[in-house]
Amino acid sequence: MSSWRRTLLGNPVATLLKVLVVLAALDWWVRGPFVDSYVAARYVKPFAILHDRTGGRDLPIFFGALARRSTGVRIAFVGDSTMNAVDGLDTTNIPYLTGEELRARLGRNDLEAIDASEIGLYGGDALLFIDKLLGAGADVVVYGASLRALPRYPVTQYVSRIGSELSPADVLRLARAGGSTWLIDNLTAEQVLSGAVRSSWATYAYRSSLRSWLWEGAAQPLVQQWPALQAALQPAPLQQPVAVAPRLPKAHAYEWSRDDYGGLNANGRALELIGQLCRRYAPGRCVLYAGPVNPLGREALADPGLYEEYLAFLRVLAGRSGLIWRDYSDTMTPADFRPPRYGGLRDPIHLNEAGRAKLAQLLAQPVAEAIGNVTAVGTGTTKRRAQ
Amino acid sequence: MIGRQELWKRLAGAIALSAAVLGSSCSSAPPESSLGQRWLDALNSHDAAQVAPLLATDAVYRDPTAQEPLGVAALSARLTREWTQWKDRVYTAIRIVDAPDTVVIEWHLQQTHPTGKAVPLDGVTILDRDGTRIRAVRDYYNAGVYLQFLRSQ
């Protein structure tokens, strides 16, 4: 090596070490002070309940916040738009209301409800959410199942990015529960590698938040005199507007046809794996329920026999996996459902505020049963009763 | 020649398989389809057509709430009636003991009465079998839990 090059670069090993130290220091800062002061202040602290505010697009914010909460019993609610209030207030959604009901019923203030629902969440994504939630320390998992979540051909717009968020530990957990074949069939190497990088490198995982922080703190004040430049440089907002649940043009006489939802597809297989995950990693602490269906026009909802087959599938799954199970299909009246937004006379599955309050009252009982299987809550560590 | 997409897919497979191999020492296989588990699956399906094929044609069913032993047709009718009332009824095996002529199932039952009251129940079922078919079913549980609903009726 020539002397000028040696002078410029120094010892390559030493230079590499310096770069690594700087990157590690930056990662420590992002993981700690940056997330606490910037990310949590925008996407966690202002809200009544922990929920992903990015429409499934920037999930490290949600899972990072979940992992930071170490006290009490964490009850994670997983489901689609039938579980959250969609365009309503956080305080009117099922996870929040169930949490309130449980705290009142059990006289405990150490219960935290977490809203892990996403608009249009399919069975496959629900499996990955539950896998990751169990890894992040959720004590109880409540999954609100819907036949809508089990299509043969999911709408890409409503597939979240959870597949790119799994750490190696999450992949291993799912494989141990019997999901290796499902993983091979449904995740790409790019997703697996991206998850491994994101889970170990906070600077990369929070890069969107960092971009926003840099923009707000440094770039925006400089370029605000040039609107065109400002428009070009401004990062897209992380907080996503509420999207509507997928409503495809109906090619069949029924909302849910056997062609689209019949048989065991990858989303149905994912539900079986949810059972296996719960059986192995959270025995007695997973609740599965079938969500309410509007009795008005129910005969037009699904191909004859399809909904009954779906319920039988859920019951067999719950029985085999030892899940706490409830069927709320027939528990509501037409007055408990939202007015229709897509034409027709009724909304088949989305509850209004009063309906959600009723369902939260019903859900409190099985969730309390699951909480009873979480014992000896200490500071930061929750020991579970072995079954 | 392997395409780029296929290559990615194979690489993903290798990663996931490696994870599976690493975790295989304590891998959790799905519950085996023993006769006991198939009996509970059939009951959980709420479909008498799935229960009947597991029984010999002259099989007999005994239960604390049945006044007399029931044959296959009477059992099917009884189960269909019960499923209409107890819509979310689900059995979970706590333990299944498989002997050559007999299967013993210790179970937990989840069910909700139409009034909304949850009525969990624990019990034991003994299946006497003749080859692959069930000759006799005997249920043992505390039938007293149902008295509250008889009184209210």
Image (cartoon, rainbow, N blue to C red):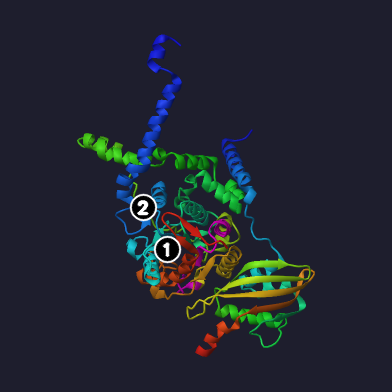
Magenta stretch: residue A63 in it? Answer: no
**Would you say B31 lies left or right of A90 here?**
right
Give the quarter of the image for residue A103: bottom left
Q: Earlier in the sequence, mark 1 or mark 2?
A: 2
Q: Which residues are magenta?
A: A270-298
In the picture, the disc for residue A53 is 2
Q: Amino acid at mark 2?
A: Arg
Q: Can residue A338 be seen in this snapshot?
A: no
Q: Is residue A162 above or below residue A19?
A: below
Q: Position of residue B145 (x, y in %)?
A: 56, 82
Give the structural element (helix, strand or loop) at label 2.
loop
Q: Is residue A206 above or below residue A92?
A: above
**Would you say A3 lies left or right of B124 here?**
left
Quarter holding the N terminus of chain B is top right
In the picture, the disc for residue A83 is 1
In three-dimensional space, the C-alpha distance between marks 1 and 2, rounded to whole angstroms, equals 15 Å
**Would you say B42 lies left or right of B147 here?**
right
**Pointer 1: residues within 10 angstroms few (<14), some, or many (20+)?**
many
Magenta stretch: residue A290 in it? Answer: yes
Q: Can residue B33 be seen in this snapshot?
A: yes
Q: Is residue A116 above or below residue A2?
A: below
Q: Position of residue A186 (x, y in %)?
A: 56, 48
Tell me which residue sits at (61%, 44%) in the image: B22
